[in-house]
Image: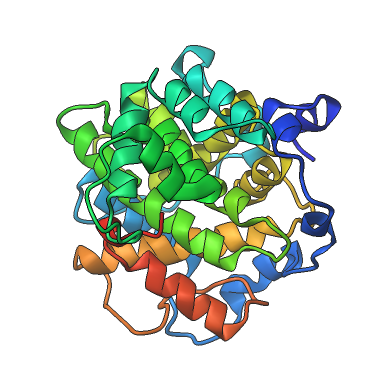
Amino acid sequence: MGGSADTHGRRSWWERWWPRRPADDAQPGPGHEALDAADGVGDADLLAAEALEIRFLCHVLGIAEPAPQDAPVSPRRPRDREREEPVDADALPRLPTVIPQLLQAMRSSKASGEGLARLLARDPALVVEVLRAANSAHYGAARAITSVRGAVVMLGEEGLRRVIARVMTRPIHTAGSGPSAVAGARLWTHAERCAEACAALAPAGGAAFEAFLAGIVCNIGAMTLMRGDAGLPAQPDAQDLEDFGLRCRRAAHQVARQWGLPPGVVEALAVRAGLSRVRTPLAPALVAADRLAMAAVLAEAGRLETTSTPPVALPQGFAPAALARAWQLARRPQGDAEL
């Protein structure tokens, strides 16, 4: 696969502590050819992927619409050149050091709530997020949970994994000020919705957390590029925005590789970025969830008509009930997210 061979040549800390279940690879799911056909299938009234992303990036950047193209559209820049263009290593976000230790402890058969609480206490951001999640309406605690150990018990392993994934990525979206803070907040809203929808569309066999993780990191590339020179003119046209979206997706793939995220996540991000045509079960779920979340955010901002069914072209092969559930989660307010 283009650009992700290193995840197979060595076992990352994710693989050592959460080995991929055999069922994850055996599950057929929608293939990559379904992604290729997605925009050419279905109701002509559905918004195509490129138009959706351009509209979403206008929302993120705070511009009403792309600048008009006075001259004839110039030829598209060769995508091979963009593929070889690495993101500045200094701009890539680093993984908080306590997170690998915490995840290793969770894999141990000797792990205890008290031991996990001690590790969590090393990172104030984790403490705040764990307590917030445990006291959310989703868990319905009879009384307020004030201890980290109590929160660990309430959340359980899957809930704690999702909290950790959020803490990995939220600060990158919220660290800016001014226009970048607004953009970060909008991208974070999208990432949370994408993660929930992706988990709902995940192939059977225990891939729900990998799907959630793929969704929650999907905008890391955009935030990485926006930290430095985003390469956008002051008044970008549709071509500029389309190219920027591509670079954002490819930067997200680079960050996922650097962090050593699970191969399934890296592969799905590579397919989403146009870097791979490998048949992978998670890729269609990520692509569909990404589009559902963009549509939901745009509808809430008044930039897209609100509909009971997804108004965008999606990969084929998902059960109607799964798509309906994913669309429901994508439109759910952040405070009501399933933790």
Q: Quadrant of the N terminus?
A: top right
Q: Is residue 88 left or right of residue 129?
A: right
User: Does residue 78 sit above or below 339 in this rendering?
Assistant: above
Q: Is residue 74 left or right of residue 66?
A: right
Q: Position of residue 245 (x, y in %)?
A: 46, 45
Q: Position of residue 298 (x, y in %)?
A: 28, 63
Q: Is residue 62 left or right of residue 152?
A: left
What is the total number of numbered labels drawn onto the structure image?
0
Which residue is at the far left?
A: 178
- Front-most of 51 and 297? 297
Q: Is residue 337 visible?
A: yes
Q: Quadrant of the C terminus?
A: bottom left
Q: Is residue 217 visible?
A: no
Q: Position of residue 13 (x, y in %)?
A: 69, 26
Residue at 60% over, 46% down: 273
Residue at 51% over, 25% down: 115
Residue at 82% over, 32% down: 8
Q: Quadrant of residue 2?
A: top right
Residue at 27% over, 50% down: 135
User: Does residue 268 sit above or below 202 in this rendering?
Assistant: above
Q: Is residue 11 left or right of residue 273?
A: right
- Front-most of 229 and 33? 33
